[in-house]
Image (spheres, rainbow, N blue to C red):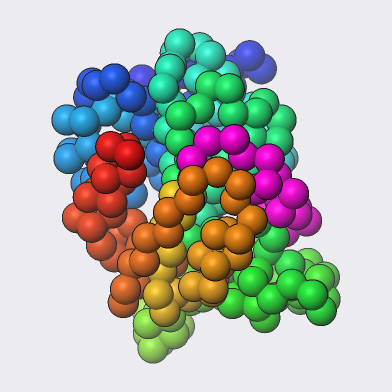
Amino acid sequence: MSYFTLSDGEKLYYEDRGHGPDTLIMMHGWTSSHEIYLQPVETLQNQARCIIYDHRGHGNSREDNRGKPVMETLAGDLNEIIQGLSLSNVTLLGWSMGAGVVFNYVRLYGCDALKRIILCDMTPKQLNDEEWKLGLYQGRYTKEDMERDAGKDFYSLYKEFAIGAIPKLAKIPGFLLKKPLKEKLAACDESVLRSLAASMKTQDNRPTVEQITVPVTYFYADPGSLFSPELADWYREHVKTPFTAVRFPESTHMLVSDHPEKFAAEVSAALRQ
């Protein structure tokens, strides 16, 4: 097992696979881990150097990373990895929270080290309001909902999120669903999850999207679950560089695991552009 030691002494688990002229850094979502990319990497490592890693408080980085990091913290971690591993010709791929890391990286460090960005099923602004309906839960989650959720126990919040991402879970009786969800949470540090969830919900990364200076590809789920397919049209209008939208039909927010072969093929195609 390989660990990257950050400047603050914390350690992130990572895997460095494959070879090629380009480097592909793939970042997972909230409560997930690098493992979601293991199947696609089997294909992609023949085309590019692939870096997959666990964010603070997640997966194999759980024990070494506690506390209350925010999205800017994760962007700083990404920057240290790029600099520390001397990576070049970098394509950043972020799914869900991983895309939020991309937004924060661009805002804080720019695009000089990047060749391309691939965003996967993520909104630039989670909280919906009167003028923004492309946020969390397909336009239904507001500041008032966030304030209400502050009083809920963490398992209940995670259960709502999991069912939002994978609607078919709602058909499973609660007593049967509890064990696998608890096991999923046990692979992460709760204080980290709480802090990152709060940080994501308060951010508005729409201005950052217009600051991107490299080509952008957006993967979106249709009919989707957490986020609306209409986000593809919003990105098409606001990204100022060459833009490609890729639809994943019959997919939930879990498009990486719903369609791993298509995911790998579409990433491969984006790298060739």
Q: Is residue 18 above or below residue 97?
A: above
Please identify the quarter of the rendering in which residue 50 is found.
Answer: top left
Image check: 13 left or right of 56? left
Is any atom of residue 209 visible in this view? yes
Quadrant, the C terminus? top left
Q: Is residue 212 magenta?
A: yes
Between 131 and 121, the one nearer to me in the picture: 131
Q: Is residue 176 magenta?
A: no
Between 180 and 56, the one nearer to me in the picture: 56
Q: Which residue occupies 74% across, 49% down?
A: 207
Q: Which residue occupies 32% across, 73% down?
A: 249
Between 242 and 170, the one nearer to me in the picture: 242
Is any atom of residue 199 visible in this view? no
Between 130 and 12, the one nearer to me in the picture: 130
Q: Position of residue 57 (x, y in %)?
A: 55, 39
Q: Position of residue 184 (x, y in %)?
A: 43, 57
Quadrant, the N terminus? top left
Query: What is the magenta range?
Result: 193-215
Q: Which residue occupies 26% across, 42% down?
A: 268
Q: Position of residue 257 (x, y in %)?
A: 30, 59
Q: Which residue occupies 79% across, 75% down?
A: 131
Image check: 211 left or right of 235? right
Q: Is residue 217 above or below residue 219?
A: above
Q: Is residue 11 above or below residue 43?
A: above
Number of on-image labels:
0
Q: Position of residue 200 (x, y in %)?
A: 69, 53
